[in-house]
Amino acid sequence: VQLAESGGGLVQPGGSLRLSCAASGFPFSYVIMNWVRQAPGKGLEWVSRISPGGTTYYADYVKGRFTISRDNARNTLYLQMNNLQAEDTAVYYCATQGELGRPPRGQGTQVRVSS
């Protein structure tokens, strides 16, 4: 399993970012995928999940602002983040359902929301 997150950066409150996760080494199109995040000094926090067929789930604190999607042909997972707030500042990771709760495989991508 290899996962490579990208797309993070510094954004002002209310701004948007689109994260990507390039997956390889497993049958991506058959696997439930997640986004998780880790804020400074805190533990991993689940953000969103998407089934192979596109059914989506969100944590209450991102519902209505974040949209998870996937391109099974490109083995890529996305997270569109709108109306970002300071509390969204974190390193964001993608994770397979089977590895949820374990240390993330990828390097993550840093999202910082600040004016």
Image (cartoon, rainbow, N blue to C red):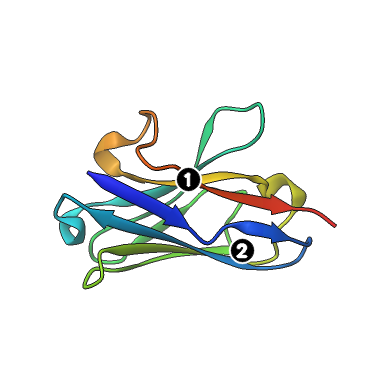
| Residue 62, position as x, y percentages in the image | 59, 54
Q: Give amino acid for label 1.
A: Gly
Asked if marks 2 and 1 touch (Cβ < 8 Å), the reply is: no
Image point 38% across, 42% down: which residue? 106
What residue is disc 2 on? Answer: 65
Q: Using the image as rendered, state which of residue 64 and residue 13 is in the foreground.
A: 13
Q: Using the image as rendered, state which of residue 91 and residue 79 is in the foreground.
A: 91
| Disc nearest the viewer among 2 and 1 | 1
> Count of labels shown?
2
| Residue 51, position as x, y percentages in the image | 28, 57
User: Which quadrant is home to the C terminus?
Assistant: bottom right
**Is residue 33 found left or right of 114 in the rendered image?**
left
Under circle 2, the secondary element is: loop
Residue 45 versus residue 41 in the image, above or below:
below
Q: Earlier in the sequence, mark 2 or mark 1?
A: 2
Crowding around mark 1 (Cα neighbors within 10 Å: few <14, some 14 to 19, many 20+) is many
| Residue 19, position as x, y percentages in the image | 50, 61
Under circle 1, the secondary element is: loop
Q: Using the image as rendered, state which of residue 86 and residue 52 is in the foreground.
A: 86
Image point 28% across, 55% down: which residue? 23
Residue 52 versus residue 108 in the image, above or below:
below
For the residues labelled 2 and 1, the Cα–Cα distance comes to 20 Å
Question: On residue 13, which mark appears?
Answer: none
Residue 3 versus residue 52 in the image, above or below:
above
Crowding around mark 2 (Cα neighbors within 10 Å: few <14, some 14 to 19, many 20+) is some
Image point 22% across, 43% down: which residue? 1
| Residue 22, position as x, y percentages in the image | 33, 59
Instruction: Determine the image quadrant of residue 107.
Output: top left
What residue is disc 1 on? Answer: 108
Q: Give amino acid for label 2.
A: Arg
